[in-house]
Each structure stands twice: as C-alpha cells, then as structure tokens.
Image: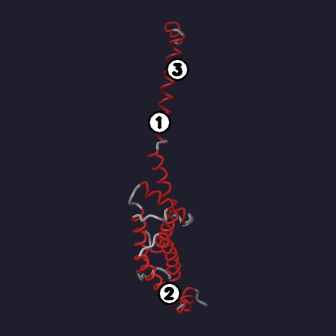
Amino acid sequence: MITRAFMKYGPQRIAAVSAILIMLVLSGFYWYNADQKKNIRVIEKVKSQAQTFIESEEVDLPSKAIYLLLQERHDSGTIMPYLGSLELKNRLTLANEVYGQILAYNKTQNIPLKASVVQMISHDLANRDSSLMPEIRLAQTNRFLILMAMDNYYMPDDIKQVQLATIADNDYDQAMLFYKNKKTCTARRFPLN
C-alpha cells in the first residue's frame, strides 16, 4: 500500500503533506503551551499554591505580608477580609507586619489600605479580649507604636498624635498590670508542681 502511494503521488508530495501535518501538530502544541504560560493562568496557579503557604506557621511574617500586598494590588479589596478572618493573635501580628511593609514601601502617601489596617489594629488593641495573652498584646502594642511613630514622623498629623498618646497610655497601663501580675501569670502558665 505504501509503495502504491509513492507511485501514485510521488515522494515529494508525500513529504510535503507529512511536513504540513507535523507542522500543524507542533504548532498546536506550541499554541497550547503558550496558552498555559499566559499571565492569567500563571497568576491563578501561584494563588492556589500560595494559599497553603500563607496558612502555614513555617512561613515568616514578612513573606506573608508581601504576598498579601501583592495580592491586594492584583485583586483590590482582598487583604482586609483575609485579615478579618484570622484569629486575634494571628490577625494582630500579620496586620502589624502588613503596616510595616506598607511603610517600608511608601512612607509619604496616605493610602486607604494603610488607614484601614491602622483602624483594624487600633480596634484589636482596644478590644479587651481575654483570648490574647498579655505579653503578646504588649509586644504587638509596642510594635504598633513604633510603626505609628515612624508614620507620624514622615507624615505628621494631629490625629496620629492623639492616637499615639492614647495607645501609649494604654500600653503603659498594660505594662504595669502585666508586671504587677507577673507572678500570678507565670505561676498559672508554669506551675511548680
């Protein structure tokens, strides 16, 4: 049968038809491969893989904060609902880190995201929830005060001055309460028996 095809059509026509078929198959593969490497597909793949990493305790906070800010830039309005879905301790530490990263990137502009993060942190610190251990509350309040003081240094504002004074007074009260109750706190967490 192959010999009849060579006799009927000639080797040049058969080679040309087979070359065209090979070219169509390879160009189809190229088209499929190029479609898989489009930005939209790559971003969706990265988002799905990053979701497991962002929930992991092994990933450091700056990496999580940078990823959340990149995701916020790509899909506006995603960072605040995500932070709101976390438990208080994780929300407070990650929100402080996000605030720090925002200040590291952009010290001289007021953006709505920065105001929202500051409002969330202020609300969480003002909340007297007992689920947050006093030493974590104290550490996160100190971190927030440092970041807010830096923000106020680069962009002075009367409202920030008032917030700084209020939070510093609350922080002082928390520190004094923590040090007065230090013996009971350590005895409760580390019993001698």
Question: In the image, what residue type sits under mark 3?
Answer: Ala
Tell me if label 3 and label 1 are in contact, CB under 8 Å. no
Mark 2 lies on residue: 172
The quadrant holding residue 77 is: bottom left
State whether residue 13 is above or below residue 113: above
State whether residue 48 is above or below residue 163: above
Q: Is residue 123 visible?
A: no
Q: Residue furthest top?
A: 7
Please tell me how crowded label 2 is: few (under 14), some (14-19), or many (20+) other residues with Cα within 10 Å: some
Q: Name the secondary structure under disc 1.
A: helix
State whether residue 137 is above or below residue 116: below
Nearer the observer, disc 2 or disc 1? 2
Please tell me how crowded label 1 is: few (under 14), some (14-19), or many (20+) other residues with Cα within 10 Å: few
Mark 1 lies on residue: 32
Mark 3 lies on residue: 19
Q: Name the secondary structure under disc 2.
A: helix
Q: Name the secondary structure under disc 3.
A: helix
Q: How many angstroms separate mark 2 from mark 1 (CA)?
A: 62 Å
